[in-house]
Image (cartoon, grey):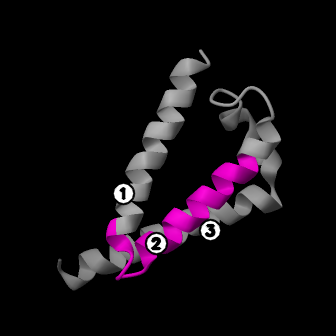
Amino acid sequence: MPQQDKRAVTLTGLALAATGLVHFVRPQLFEPITVASFPQNTRRHVYTNGSIETAIGLALAGRTTRKLGVAGLLGYAAYLAGNTVRNR
């Protein structure tokens, strides 16, 4: 992978991790989005999603954990999509 692409993936991972941390600082920003997938205990799921996004973002940012981060990202997308479909 070219150096420029590696930097882009690292920055994307750090941005995702930062977004995950914002879930804890300003959870009310994420509740309108989260309620579609998790109509019950929405605030708890905002925090759970923030934890997952922080972990995945840090995994993507690290060179040695990047493949694990990609796998986590795919699993997380499936988890969110499944809950959204189930709760419609």
| Image quadrant where one finds the N terminus | bottom left
Residue for badge 1: 71
Give the structural element (helix, strand or loop) at label 2. Answer: helix
> Residue 14 placed where, x, y %?
52, 73
Residue 18: which numbered mark, if any?
Answer: 3
Distance of label 1 from label 2 (alpha carbons): 10 Å
Over which residues does the magenta segment extend?
46-67
- Mark 1 vs mark 3, foreground winner is 1
Q: Using the rendered view, name the quadrant where residue 21 is placed.
A: bottom right
Residue located at (44% from left, 67% from top): 12
Give the structural element (helix, strand or loop) at label 3. Answer: helix
Q: Which amino acid does label 2 sit on?
A: Ala
Closer-to-camera residue (81/9): 81
Residue 1: which numbered mark, if any?
Answer: none
Q: Using the rendered view, name the quadrant where residue 41 is placed.
A: top right
- Mark positioned earlier in the residue sequence (1 or 2): 2
11 relative position to 16: left or right? left
Residue for badge 2: 59
Give the structural element (helix, strand or loop) at label 1. Answer: helix
How many neighbours does mark 1 have within 10 angstroms: few (below 14), some (14-19), or many (20 or more)? some
Query: Does the segment drawn in magenta span residue 39?
Result: no
Give the farthest residue toward the left.
Answer: 1
